[in-house]
Amino acid sequence: MREDHSGCSKTSGRCQQGYSLMLRNRAPQTIAAANGIGKDAAFGSVTPPLYLSTTFTFDGFNRPRAYDYTRAGNPTRDLLADTLAQLEAGAGAVVVSSGMAAIDLTLGCLEPGDLIVAPHDCYAGTWRLLTMRQAKQQFDVVFIDFADDAALKLALARAPKRVLIETPSNPLMRVVDIRKIAVQAKAAGAKVIVDNTFLSPALQQPIRLGADFVVHSTTKFLNGHSDVVGGVVVAASQKDAEELTVWANTIGVTGAPFDAYLTLRGVRTLFVRVERQERTAAAISTFLNTHPAVTAVHYPGLPSHPGHEIAKSQQTGFGAMLSFEIAGGVDGVRRFVESLEVFTLAESLGGIESLVAHPATMTHASMSQEARLVAGISESLLRLSVGLENEADLLADLARALQAV
Ligand SMILES: *Cc1c(COP(=O)(O)O)cnc(C)c1O
């Protein structure tokens, strides 16, 4: 790292010389909308420039500047990292090429025999990553139901190195108490990672609740336009942030500058998008909850949801994701998705467009059937990512498709 030469931390993008673009100590909405705006020293460009260059000139012999090579550090990527670190109340962030790369990065410095505790109903890609690395003996994993206090206690008695939490979980929207788990995990000597993809820092800031790391698939709400695959790890401590920065450069998973530029453009509107999407999701959850063809609705905003009180205590909103189960089995599911016109049948989430997914055949197909059943993911389960379309149009679309069930 070049910090010694330049006075520039590549972890956070905070530089003493040349590139001091960052807003500090403002409300999150202001950081999202305006971090780095109007600071271009060269031409006064209001929008921060996109630096695509892979390499940077030396000032002279043995005189590197703040940046030398884009895998190691890049001004556009660092501005995004700084923005996300501030939004998550972390000490620093590393922007990487996907959400999976972000999760893998937090586990890269574990050793054979080290244990990870993970949720039994985690994102299927996470489940695959953990089980495939475990099969190579790179670390051990135990999957538990975090709502089961006894199971958590047993797992923590095995002195894990990392505890991975996903709340609300994908796709069942289960909510677990981050504060409580973080206290117990730390007492057991483990560092806590929270996958905050489903809510974004606009609605939940896990570091403030005791997490050591927050990971995101920035592909989802943070970019918000379904046109970039990316990820980020935010660390609570400067030391962890620096260590991850070294690892990300060493293994070469840092994100592309153009992707960082687009993602920052998405982050500018994060708060208004999430606010509106959440409002529509709440209306949809209420509609589905009383519909005769719907057998269950999983949305933490419903007072009947088992995680409603915990969600209220640690989230500032209930989010734009929900799932539900319909009558009529797989045939009912097929008739339903084939009747939708406004919702699009596709994986992923958090974009401006509303999507419907069938976890058993789509997002969670890479999970074994046994694991799916243990996690409670039935063939009748559908997941919605609510976008920015007109609320009445979305409700009418669902009403018509449910008639076909
Ligand atoms: C999408 C997703 C990931 C993986 O992110 P990619 O950007 O697709 O690699 C991880 N966790 C959750 C909760 C996700 O939704």
Image (spheres, helix red, strand yellow):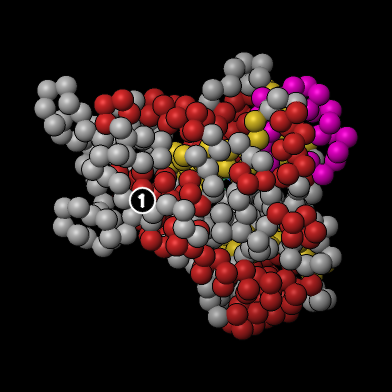
In the rendered structure, the answer to whether residue 52 lies left or right of residue 312 reads left
Q: Report the residue at 65% width, 35% height from top.
A: 192
333 vs 51, left or right, is: right
- Closer to us: 223 or 21: 21
One can see residue 365 in this view = no
| Residue at the far top in the pictured view | 112
- Quadrant where the C terminus sits is bottom right
Q: Nearer the viewer, residue 380 or 135?
A: 135
Amino acid carrying mark 1 in the image: Met
Q: Residue at x 12, y 23 (%)?
A: 61
Lateral position of residue 122 relative to residue 125, left or right = right
Q: Which residue is mark 1?
A: 22
Residue at position x 70%, y 54% in the image: 314
Categorize mark 1 by other alpha carbons within 10 Å: few (<14), some (14-19), many (20+). some
Residue 146 location, x and y as percent?
A: 78, 41
| Spot occupied by residue 322 in the image (x, y as percentages of width and height) | 68, 62
Q: Is residue 263 above or below residue 85?
A: below
Task: Tell me, yes or no, if residue 161 can be seen here.
Answer: yes
Query: In which quadrant of the rendered view does residue 193 lie?
Result: top right
**In the figure, 145 relative to 112: above or below?**
below
- Image quarter where the N terminus lies is top left
Q: Position of residue 279 (x, y in %)?
A: 63, 73
Q: Secondary structure at mark 1?
A: loop
* Image location (x, y in percent) of residue 375: 77, 45
Q: Which residues are magenta?
A: 146-166
Specify the quadrant of the image occupied by residue 326. bottom right
